[in-house]
Image (spheres, grey):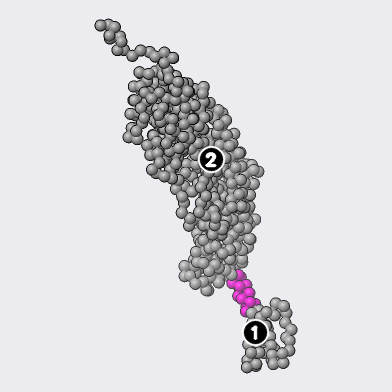
Amino acid sequence: MIKQILGKLPRKPSSKSIPNDTKDGGVAGAETPFINSSQGPNSVGSGLNNSKASSAPAGKASNASSGASRTNNGASAQQSSTINKPNGGRKSAAVASQAGPLSASSAYEALPSFRDVPSSEKQNLFIRKLNMCCVVFDFTDPSKNPSEKDIKRQTLLELVDYISSVSSKFNEIVMQEITKMVTANLFRAFPSSNHDNKLLEAYDPEEEEPMMEPAWPHLQIVYEFLLRFVASSETDAKLAKRYIDHSFVLKLLDLFDSEDQREREYLKTILHRIYGKFMVHRPFIRKAINNIFYRFIFETERHNGIAELLEVLGSIINGFALPLKEEHKLFLLRALIPLHKPKCVSMYHQQLSYCITQFVEKDSKLADTVVRGLLKHWPITNSSKEVMFLSELEEVLEATQTAEFQRCMVPLFRQIGRCLNSSHFQVAERTLFLWNNDHIRNLITQNRKVIVPMIFPALERNTRGHWNQAVQSLTLNVKKVFMDSDPQLVEDCLVKFQEDEAKERERLEKRESAWKRLEDVAAARAVSNEAVLVSRFMSSLAVTTSTTPRAAVGS
């Protein structure tokens, strides 16, 4: 009776009884059933735990070559052979034999949940899950691998939860696996956009439809994972800088050219966290962003992430120590100010204006440099861009002190005078709004002896003949400000303006008289075909005007 009972109990298999395919990196068919698309991570985990109780020795044998098995079947990248991995999540031999490298038919099975393994095994399971998530699926075809995509998504979510709750420092092996998984998923070449084959003049980023990233369901979680890893207090910067190195940062910066706004938002936050945590990388990050700006300004004028990079820089500039280093001043002069040049400046002007203003607030002596830089790149035919420049100019002048204002006020108010007379009412109106700012109005009032004679003719012409009623009304308000502060100066400017008008009328009358005499002489000599001697500047017009009388005589 006892022998019969003992005969029914499972015997511990010997090493000789282990199949050869398990030793070579395959998985015993009885160890784990194939995962259907309807099964989630929890049900898979419980199944793996049940099988672990009945076949633990076989699991140990399969662990020795599990890394090679997964690599050969295309489910993950290279795997560290020094890590002992717990049993579970293996492919069946029938499926593994058919799998190709990263193909749609690759076997892809969920691993047990972190809740279902003891604490001592969680790190090993974490590494196995990281390796499992190195597989990149094709999202251009929604019908491909739907169950495998869902398994990976659930695994990524588990990784995010784990990295947020971990209570011990990440070691070097874990960091290596983390960066490997992030690199496999995030760093990629973007498909060529529709505008790549167009002429630069025809490219308008505001008109182009942005291409949304089809793999975002996975990418979003990977970005969240990377963000939490960088921000985690368990991430030792001295150790992590070996893996989040210059090459990693450069590849991360390349991703800013993504057309997907969601991706750029994550990149912006992650880059800012890296800049804050890895102090050793700070000069390199600034230089790399510099190079992106140079290429954008002077070569391509095409980049999707300038606004986000400027947003990161705005925070960086805000933290610059005083006095400012020469490196930072050169960055302002060589990169930020020339960023006003591209046609698509409207895409990032708000962030650019913030960065410029931060510099002036840090060091008011830079105001003269900034104002002259704006004047150098001032638009001539683009009215909407001109309105943006005027808005930025107001922010800069608000942070400008009297001494710096006096250095640049002459060229500045020459340009303001031209803007006052703009036929585009928004340009003229935005210029007149400068007088609504108390600080700017005080600066102008203090230097009215220089400024009023420069802009009074423009104000007077607006009052007399601007087509827009709102512009005329605002101009009268500005004139009233000057009248209240210095009526004698305004009176002198009015007399000077009237004298200049009289001289201009006299000059025009002389010009008309000279042309009339020329036409009369040309008409009198047209009959005899006698040549009329005129200056080279008048010759083209003289020939044109002389053809009419000659034709009349000929007829």
In the picture, the disc for residue 545 is 1
Relative depth, front residue between 378 and 429:
378
Disc 1: CA contacts within 10 A as few (<14), some (14-19) or many (>=20): some
What is the magenta range? Answer: 492-505
The amino acid type found where label 1 is placed reads Thr
Is the C terminus in the top left, top right, bottom left or bottom right quadrant? bottom right
Q: What residue is at 73 percent from the left and 86 percent from the top? A: 531
Relative depth, front residue between 125 and 351:
125
Q: What residue is at 49 percent from the left and 64 percent from the top? A: 426
**Vertical order, 466 against 553 (above or below):** above
Q: What residue is at 61 percent from the left and 66 percent from the top? A: 453
Is the N terminus in the top left, top right, bottom left or bottom right quadrant? top left
Residue 521: image x %, image y %? 69, 89
Residues tagged 1 and 2 counted as in contact (Cβ below 8 A) = no
The amino acid type found where label 2 is placed reads Leu
Q: Is residue 222 left or right of residue 491?
A: left
Look at the image and say whether residue 496 sits in the magenta stretch: yes
Element marked by disc 2: helix
Q: Quadrant of residue 459?
A: bottom right
Residue holding disc 2:
252
